[in-house]
Amino acid sequence: MKPVKIGIIGLGTVGGGTVNVLKRNAEEIARRAGRQIVIARASAKDLSKQRICDTTGIELTTDPYDIINDPEIEIVCELIGGAGAVKDMVLAAIAKHKHVVTANKSLIALHGNEIFAEASKQGVIVAFEAAVAGGIPIIKAIREGLSGNHIEWLAGIINGTGNFILTEMRDKGRDFYDVLKEAQALGYAEADPTFDVEGIDAGHKLTILASIAFGIPLQFDKVYTEGITKITREDVEYAEELGFRIKHLGIARQTAKGIELRVHPTLIPERRLIANVDGVKNAVLVYGDAVGPTLYYGAGAGAEPTASAVVADIIDVVRALTSDPENRVPHLAFQADALHNVPVLPPEQFKTAYYLRLNAEDKPGVLADVTRILAQHHISIDSIIQLKPLDDCALVPVILLTQITLEQEMNAAIAEIEALSTVNGKINRIRLETLG
Ligand code: HSE
């Protein structure tokens, strides 16, 4: 059969890795796809820049539209990231009846509904495995491998930079910003690192996972995001003493009232496998009613791990080139006309357990006041620890672990406790999930 010609927009970390994998494994890839895959053209902003890949035999251009408008190219790989001009490029490629492979999580999370609708109209595929958890085939696992299940919840470490920072803080006692700088130098961090540390990147990925798990439209604007900048070394150490690890999790859960979509630092029992996923690695735990818990682990960022997912998508598209569009796996796992508008819950409606750290005066009745306020808000305490006084200070740190409660009750209780004259400053609150 005639080789399939593809074009690659972007020759940075992911684009360069994709060229390398496609070239190195060309023979095996052709045996899998049933056709040879040829990189006919590639574009980059600056062609004089040093690359991680060998571009011999590829026609290079600075204009992505040279690729999009080339009638010979059947698959366009968008590997530049971002959601501005890139959206127009992807829509232009679709309008030209080209299949698209992308690693762009923000593009899919923010504009996926529109992009998939256009793709369906044109009968083309938009594949995005590399958009979530780098090299872990989590989209395929949920969309196809678990398609017989009712997915109850999923929880994932889906930002490698954040996990790297928390791991280094815990293992080496390193400072937050010092580790962030290293993650940037290693090429893990987003162009704007606040996306990593404030949970926005994880929010994009969670949006995608929730849609394919629950059959709902993509709705990034409804994801609650909280970053890791307020986590202190003390919290990490106290959590360890209590048998927990702090991980920055993306959690999507179906409840009777609606869906919880939330990204925040979370205490999880250290005995859980996912609690031991360290460094830049990602992991996603998915709970299906039939299968129970399943865990997917691997590299969530980096040139070749991400290329692994991009190339798998290219192979999938090549295999599907001759199939009728209506017989293909739906973009969001569920048929487009069968997505449900289940409400996404506001944070006040979340139900979770909590770790609370407060600094209180060391005198009779202080803890009684705190526990009375919690009881008035129907919050049950699991454990309470009073630590040694802080240096040169009459205050003692108190750690409380609560049972599952409604977030709005916890918000009200925290406000009342913070108003006590015997409690100093703000309470540090971290949500706790047993992931059982
Ligand atoms: N900045 C992202 C991360 C890259 O650290 O996980 C992969 O999406």
Image (cartoon, helix red, strand yellow):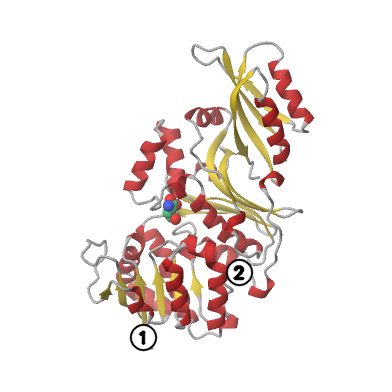
Which of 359 and 213 lies nearest the eye of the viewer? Answer: 359
Q: How many other residues sit within 10 Å of disc 1, few (<14), some (14-19) or many (≥20)?
A: some
What SS does tag 1 mark? loop
**Residue, disc 1:** 72
Q: Which residue is rendered at x = 36% and y = 37% of the image?
A: 178
Expressed as whole percent of the image width and height from the top left, the position of residue 288 reads: 66, 58
Q: Let me know if residue 99 appears in the view.
A: no
- The residue indicated by pointer 2 is 333
Q: Quadrant of residue 165?
A: top left
Q: Is residue 429 above or below residue 273?
A: above
Q: What secondary structure is found at the residue carrying circle 2?
A: loop
Going by the numbered disc 1, the residue's amino acid type is Glu
Q: Quadrant of the C terminus?
A: top right
Foreground tag (1 vs 2): 1
| Residue 233 appears left or right of 344 | left
Residue 400: x percent and y percent?
Answer: 65, 27
N-term mark: 1 or 2: 1
Q: In terms of image quadrants, where is residue 59?
A: bottom left
In the shown orientation, is residue 309 left or right of residue 38? right
Q: Is residue 371 left or right of residue 191?
A: right
Q: Nearer the viewer, residue 288 or 221?
A: 221
Query: Residue 2, percent across and down?
Result: 36, 88
The x and y percentages for residue 201 are 49, 53
> In percent of the image, x 71 and y 40: which residue is there?
408
Q: Quadrant of the N terminus?
A: bottom left
Amino acid type assigned to the residue bearing label 2 in the image? Ala
Q: What residue appears at the point 41 percent right and 61 percent down from the top-left corner?
A: 306
Does 369 sit above or below residue 8?
above
Position of residue 190 relative to residue 128, above or below, is above
